[in-house]
Amino acid sequence: MADAAPLPRFYVPPVTGRARAAWRDGHEVPLPPTEAHHAARVLRLQAGDAVELFDGCGASAAARVVHVRRGEVVAVVESVGAPAARPLPHIHLAFAVPKGRRLTWLLEKATELGVESLVPVRFERSVAARGDLSAAARRRWVAHSIAAAKQARLVFLPALEPPCTLQEFLASPHAGIYGDLSTAAVPVAEALRACVPLAAFYVVVGPEGGLTAAERRAMDAGGLAAARLGRTTLRIETAAIALVSAVTALQGG
């Protein structure tokens, strides 16, 4: 017998001031406008259809649509899932911003891999325009991240941190690794084996123009270890996902 098709999933953020959604059986939950549009106009859901809800903070629930009208969709909670905990290590990805669709791809794949936070960092040789870090761009980031979490059936969304300079990022110590092509860097597997397993682990990826000597010294002093991914020069998004995947595999996440 074939497995049942997975239920449509919808993101409903927790009420402002709450760490996660406080759903209970019988609770009616209105879908946010963008999710309601997707449910009613794209999926053509009707009253009685079963769905899943998640809040991006670890809460989930099985629900059923009870109202579809004039762009509004309401579901009633039938069963609340057990609160989830993020798997260890909690991976935080700081990265030079690539342009256009490459950034979209990075956000989607980092979300799928369970990254806890995403930090856009300005390096000396960063090439992305200032507009790539605008408020409108950040709203698009959130939308892509939500779509990736829905597809991957995750219950957590990564936090999208405000853009900062490398100096601002390193204002507090960050244990982890940064990608580096210099001869001083060791292979990523070796770098990770030398790291003590940590609850919070930082991965830093610089611009395609490379890191300056001053940036390397600053990251070394800030608690990050240089790690090399082979002999080729990788694009930002490729290096980011490769490093996060290595941490997930070798640090037990």
Image: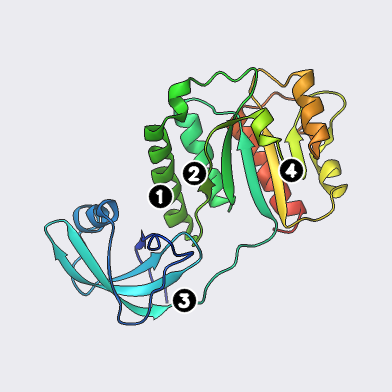
Point out residue 223 in the picture as x, y percentages from the top left corner. 81, 40
- Classify mark 3: helix, strand or loop: loop
Residue at numbered disc 3 = 81
Residue under the image location 52 percent in, 37 percent down: 162
Residue hosting label 2: 108
First in sequence: mark 4 vs mark 3: 3
Q: Label 4, label 3: how many angstroms apart (C-alpha)? A: 34 Å
Relative side of 187 to 148, left or right? right
Q: Secondary structure at mark 4?
A: loop
Taking depth in this image into account, of 231 and 88 the one nearest to the observer is 88
Residue tagged by mark 1? 147
Asked if marks 2 and 3 touch (Cβ < 8 Å), the reply is: no
Q: CA distance from mark 2 to mark 3?
A: 25 Å
- Amino acid on which the number 3 mark rests in the picture: Gly
Instruction: Give the image location of residue 104, x and y in percent.
Output: 46, 36
Q: CA distance from mark 1 to mark 4?
A: 29 Å
Residue carrying label 4: 174
Up-down relation of residue 88 to residue 189 (above or below):
below
Name the amino acid type tagged 4: His
Tell me the residue at 74%/35% (across/down): 178
Give 154 or 5, whichever is nearer the viewer: 154
Mark found first going from the N terminus, 1 or 3: 3
Residues at circles 1 and 2 in contact by the CB criterion of under 8 Å: yes
Which comes sooner in the sequence, label 4 or label 2? 2
Inspect the image, locate mark 2, and give the three-letter code of the amino acid beneath it.
Answer: Glu
* Numbered disc 1: secondary structure: helix
Q: Earlier in the sequence, mark 1 or mark 4?
A: 1
Vertically, is 249 above or below 170?
A: below
Q: Nearer the viewer, mark 1 or mark 4?
A: 4
Q: CA distance from mark 1 to mark 2?
A: 8 Å
